[in-house]
Image (cartoon, helix red, strand yellow):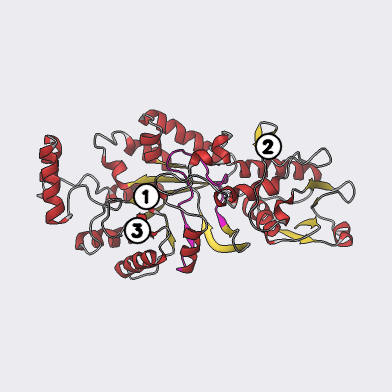
Amino acid sequence: MLLVYTHKITPRVNYIFKHYFVRILQIPVTFTTKVDEFVAHSGPKITYSKAPLGTEFFIRSHDLLFEQGINDIDINMSKWDETPCFFTAGETSSIPFDIFAAGFYLISRYEEYLPHVQDVHERFPAEESLAVKNNFIEKPVIDIWAYKFLELLKEKFPNYKYTNRAFNLISTIDIDVAFAYKHKGIVRTIGGFTNDILHFRVVNFWRRLLSVLNFRNDPFDTFKELLKIKKEHNVTTLFFFLIGDYTTFDKNISSSNSKFRSVIKSVADYAKIGLHPSYFTFKNVEKLKKEKLRLEHIMNTSITFSRQHFLRLSIPETYQNLIDLDLQEDYTMGYAKVVGFRASTCTPFYFYDLDFEIQTPLKIFSFAFMDVTLKDYMNLSPEESLQKIVELKDAVKEVNGTFISLFHNETLSENEVWKGWKTIYKTTVLD
């Protein structure tokens, strides 16, 4: 048991210390504001305050964890050895910055509450983030800080029995469009043929025709292949189905289609199914509720996790809506334009609502990359994409974190657009 002395125990202090010590370092932690209790403790202990009590392990605190609400904070970057950090703490501190305030600033997504210019999809832009501006987006710096801190703890308290967590890998699959050509209804099917003819896409026309007539498999119907890989390599695989009504941004087939429903049910026999809330749900709780109930009706079971379509996330409103509907986990935390760690951690964490100053029951799983980001936004070749994936995976392995990938069902289609990506997927999900 690690004992922390601090002059004031706040919800922010409790939240971030438990993320570092309980979730990352597997060390139970408790707090005290009583000096005599702290002095009497014989196990590992640290002081987190403005001044040390004596010669103990001391971290000089920034004001952030003792404040409420949102304030405009000046941030000046520095280095802890080679690792970027901020909120410098001075020479008396055992480490050169307030690791806890900095971690809280990043993991709470504090900066996303501050005024910012939204992108075309009303999202917080990656380029506005501290991590992108200072080139540490591809490093889970909170976990790196934690492990560097652990080495100092081991030097100070060598007799304490420390335990290590294990590396974890989760493959997540978004099903924006279940089928490329089939089961889309007469109007959309005729429209597809007409579009192929008008744009002289002869090859696409014949592929569409053969698929519709059942002479060849639909290229996006890769579910058996994904489930086969899951089984062969014992991969934790989560599927997120988009079942919203058809819009400019939501183009899956109708949720009332029997073939589509059959796919959802067959996948659910072998893997966990989550909701992929449609484009216009991110600030609309009624639409979100409708889609959740729709998927639950198809599966005849409750839905407990989700990921927003287009990664449309408005903090805190989207998360508050998910909580209101009893969703327990969300996998939206990441950027479309860049790979890396939006909350600067590769450890699942509970959303801290700065509006109400509470830790919520919603658990956030931050993904490391999305296939479309590598191919379309970063314009990387398949070989370059795989190299980037390996780098991100190695960064997570170094801190025994949770590595979460985001692919789509069409990524394994091996069509002209996704040639070579089936191999990338298989390589990614192998430990």
Q: Tell me: 213 left or right of 426.
A: left
- Front in this rendered view, residue 143 or 26: 143
* Residue pointed to by mark 1: 173
For the N terminus, the quadrant is: bottom right
Q: CA distance from mark 3 to mark 1?
A: 14 Å
* Residue pointed to by mark 3: 270
Q: Give the mark toward the camera: 3 or 2.
A: 2
- Front in this rendered view, residue 219 or 58: 58
Q: Is residue 43 visible?
A: yes
| Place of residue 232 in the rendered image (x, y in percent of width and height, measured from the top left) | 37, 47
Mark 3 or mark 1: whose residue is earlier in sequence: 1
Q: At label 1, which amino acid type do we have? A: Ile
Q: Is residue 282 above or below residue 378?
A: below
Residue at 34% of width from left, 58% of height from top?
270
Q: Is residue 291 above or below residue 203?
A: below
| Place of residue 24 in the rendered image (x, y in percent of width and height, measured from the top left) | 63, 50
| Place of residue 263 in the rendered image (x, y in percent of width and height, measured from the top left) | 26, 58
Q: Quadrant of residue 350?
A: bottom right
Secondary element at tag 2: loop
Q: Tell me: 352 left or right of 385.
A: right
- Front in this rendered view, residue 242 or 395: 242
Q: Which residues are magenta?
A: 325-350
Q: Give the mark toward the camera: 2 or 1.
A: 2
Secondary element at tag 1: strand
Q: CA distance from mark 3 to mark 2?
A: 49 Å
Mark 2 or mark 1: whose residue is earlier in sequence: 2
Q: At label 2, which amino acid type do we have? A: Asn
Q: Tell me: 401 left or right of 154.
A: left
Q: Is residue 157 visible?
A: no
Does residue 408 belong to the magenta stretch? no
Give the class, few, some or many, for how many residues have Cα within 10 Å of label 2's Cα (few <14, many ≥20). Answer: few
